[in-house]
Amino acid sequence: MEEIIKNPSIIREKLYPEDADRLFQLFESPSSSPCEMDYQIKGEERWLRTTFIPITDPSGNVLKVLNFTREITYWRKRGQYAEKTNQMNLCSQIAAGFAHEIRNPLTTIKGFLQLMYQDKSDIYQQMIIQETERIESIINEFLMLAQPYPGQDFILINVKDIVGDIFLTINPQASESNIKVFMTGGKNLPSVNGSPEQIKQALLNLIKNAIQAMPLGGTLYISVAKVDEGVSIMIKDEGTGISPEKLSRLGIPFYSNKEEGAGLGIMISRQIIKNHQGTVTFESEIGKGTIVEVILPSADVSDLQEN
């Protein structure tokens, strides 16, 4: 630490500005009681904790300060994981109660609407039914957060077919936003165990986010490839990018990187992929866009046959 005090530029380069300011303040204006500070190395996932122990005279004046620094990355990540788990459990409980309370009366309303509005040529009647079905779809998404999809209902899935269907769905919307979509790969892919509807929903949420990240247009790349773990679906946009601080908070309940977002899309997608024993990772850089990679494990055909 003596080297840091003599050469403050060293710590300025390695820490985020607000952390560097706080750390220097503790050095320059030491407290008369012990204290500590946690901070992150810029651009890395490493966390450090510096503890300050003042040595005082009988009058309480600080004569000198002992300090030592240790790495706390493991404990920090463990705490963040526990916090996210608690948040997810709470959100799941809220989602389950909310969905069940609404779904029952909604089913009745939908049934009577279908009986009342049977004139398929009436655009307004059909719009009411479509919007009711959309509400039902949103409720079903909430239930995805509340409980994992039962593995015994999984089937063998060709991921290339699912991504191909999504490509046909989003291409018109992308064209309207001056976005070109390119899909590559998909040869010799292993099958995946899962729910086609849920995997499609998860990927569609992530791809829509990528489109919304390019308000001025651009190019969206979707690649599907075989990897050691199974199948990789990579979504790359040329959008505005996400800062490291915001990137670390993606998936937190009701946190959104968009002004009008509710923060549910990524959370639901992550939960769906997690239910399929897969992973979702994000890489982003301001001004250069974002890369999302979804990895789904190869199907265990023997387990599927036993079920």
Image (tube, rainbow, N blue to C red):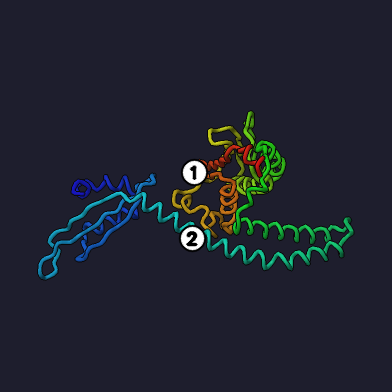
Q: What residue is at 44 percent from the left and 57 percent from the top? A: 82
Q: Tag 2: Cα neighbours inside 10 Å, few (<14), some, or many (≥20)?
A: few
Q: Is residue 306 left or right of residue 55?
A: right
Q: Amino acid at mark 1?
A: Ser
Q: Is residue 7 left or right of residue 74?
A: left
Q: Is residue 244 left or right of residue 19?
A: right
User: Residue 14 or 150: which is nearer the viewer?
Assistant: 150
Q: Amino acid at mark 2?
A: Asn
User: Residue 168 or 172: which is nearer the viewer?
Assistant: 168
Q: Secondary structure at mark 1?
A: strand
Disc 1 designates what residue? 284
Where is residue 88 shown, x and y percent of the image? 53, 58
Where is residue 188 shown, x and y percent of the image? 63, 29
Q: Is residue 202 left or right of residue 81?
A: right
Residue 248 vertical position relative to residue 58 in the rendered view, above or below: above
- Residue 176 appears in the rendering: no
Q: Which mark is residue 86?
A: 2
Q: Quadrant of residue 190?
A: top right
CA gap, disc 1 and disc 2: 26 Å
Which part of the image, by quadrant, shows the C terminus? Answer: top right
Q: Secondary structure at mark 2?
A: helix
Q: Quadrant of residue 132?
A: bottom right
Instruction: Work out which residue is located at the far top of the displayed protein and give it.
Output: 188
Q: What residue is at 20 percent from the left and 46 percent from the top? A: 3
* First of labels 1, 2 by sequence position: 2
- Residue 57 appears in the rendering: yes
Instruction: Work out which residue is located at the far left of the displayed protein and give it.
Output: 58
Where is residue 225 shown, x and y percent of the image? 59, 33
